[in-house]
Amino acid sequence: MYKKSLSILLLQLPLWGTSLGDVSDYALRHSTIIQHSKANIEYNRLKHKQVSASKFGEIDLVGNYTHYNHPRTLAPMTPADMATDPQGVATTKDMFTTGITYSVPLFTGFAMTQDIEMANLSLAMAKSKLSLSKEQLVYNVRSLYMSVLSLYELASAQNSHIKALKSLERSVKESVKLGKRASVDLLKVQRDLYDAISILEDIKANTKKTIATLEALSGMEHISKLDRVSIHITKPHYSISKLLSQAMKSNKVKISKYNLKKASKMIQKSQAQYYPTVSLDSYYGYSYGENDPTNPRSGEWADEKNYQVAINAKWKLYDFGKRDASVQQARISQLQAQLDNKQTLLDLKKSIIQAREDIKKAYAKYVASLKQYKLAKKSLKIENAKYKSGASSIDELLYTKAQTMLSRAKLIQSKYDYQKAKYFMDYVLENGLNKGDKR
C-alpha cells in the first residue's frame, strides 16, 4: 500500500526542466538578433539627436598663421585711423589669429525640418522592428520547442512499441522451442524489432539536433530537458475580416506606413533646393604679429581685437537639371514605398488566410488521426487474439502493430502541428509577446 501511494505521489510531482517561458525569456534577453535591433534603436536615437542639434549651429575655436610678401595691418584700417596715429599702426608679414566662430542656419528651405521629421520616423521604425524581431524570435523558439516535445513523445511511443515487440519476441521464441511456431516467425519479429530500434535512434538524433538549434537560437549554452506544455485542441472559428482589422495595428503595417511618410518627407526635402538659404556667421578673436622692419616699432609684438557678424544668403538660379533630377528620384522612391505598402497588406492577408487554413487542417488531421488510432488499437487487440489462437499469421500481426504505431505517430505529430499553427497565427497577428508562455 505504501509503495502504491508513493508511486502515485511521484507521478503527480513535476519533472523539473526548462520551460517554454524560460527559453523565450532567455532568448529575448540574450539573442544576437534582439541585441542588433536594440543597437539599431540606439543608432537612430543618436542620429535624431545629431540632426536636431544641427539647427542650433556650431561654435568653433579657430587659429591661423599666414606669411605675406608685403606687410599687413593686424586689423582693417580706415582713413580716420591712419590720420589719428599713423606711427601707432602695427604691421607685420607674419600674422597669427585666434578666435571663436559661431555659425547657424536661419533658413534652409525647410530641408532641416524634413531631416528632423525623417529622423523621428527612422527612430519609430527601429522600435517597431525591434518588436517585430521579438515576435519572430518567440515564434521560432515556440516552434522548435514544440518539435522537441513531439520528438520526446514519439520516442516514448517508439519505446513502448519496442517493448511490445520484445515481449512478442519472447513469446514466439518460447513457441518455437515448443514446436508450436515456425522459426521464420521469430525471424520476422526480430526483423521488425531491429527496424523499430533503428527508428528510435533516428528520433534521438533528431531530438539532439533540434535542441542544438534551439540552444543556438535562444543563446542558452545547454538545455538538458524541456518541460511539457498543455495543448488544448478545439475546433477553430476565425473571421478573416476581424483578423485583418486586428492585423492593421501590427508593426508590419506601421513600418510600411513609416516608409510612406519618409518618402513624402524626402520629396519635400528635395524641393527645398528651390528656396534660398540664409545663415548667420560671427567671429570674435585677436590678431598677433611682430612689427616688420619698415614699422617705427620694428621688432615689437602687437595685437588687435576683431569681431564681426554677417548674414549670408544664397539662392541657386540654375544647376543644369540637378534639382529636378533629385525631385524625380524622390517621387520614384515614394511610388516604390506605395507599392511596398500595397504588397505588405497583400502579404499580410495571405499570411492570415494561411494561418487559419493551417489551423483548420491541423485540427482535421488530429481528429482523423485520433479515430485512426482508436480503430488501430482495436484491430491490434483482435489480431493478437487471432494470432494466439492460430487463426492469423505473424505477418498480419506485425503489419497491424506497425499500422498502430504509425497511427500513434500521426496522432502525436498532428497534435503538435496544431499548436505550431496556433503559434504561427499569434506571430502573424503579433500576439506572441502579449500572450506569453507559462513558466
Image (cartoon, helix red, strand yellow):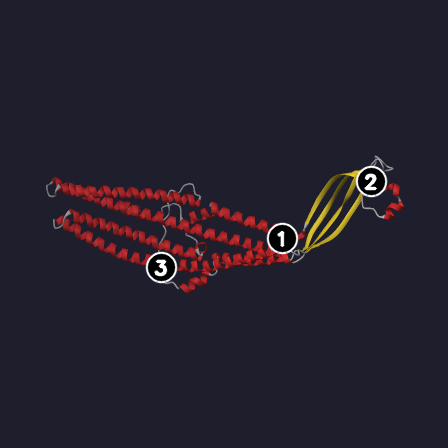
Label 1 SS? helix
User: Gap in Å between the C-alphas at discs 1 and 3?
Assistant: 48 Å
In this rendering, the label closer to the viewer, 2 or 3: 2
Q: Which residue is mark 3?
A: 357
- Give percent across and percent down for residue 406: 25, 50
Q: Please rate how many residues cluster around mark 2, counting C-alpha atoms within 10 Å: few if below 14, some from 14 to 19, many from 20.
A: many
Q: Quadrant of residue 118?
A: bottom right
Q: Which residue is mark 2?
A: 91
Q: Is residue 437 above or below residue 194?
A: below
Q: Point out the tag, 2 or 3, that comes first from the N-terminus.
A: 2
Residue type, label 1: Ser
Residue occupying the point 34% across, 53% down: 417
Residue type, label 3: Glu
Q: Quadrant of residue 90?
A: top right
Q: Nearer the viewer, residue 396 or 91?
A: 91
Q: Are marks 2 and 1 in contact (CB under 8 Å)?
A: no
Label 3 SS? helix
Q: Quadrant of residue 358?
A: bottom left
Q: Which residue is mark 1?
A: 52
- Spot the residue most to the right: 84
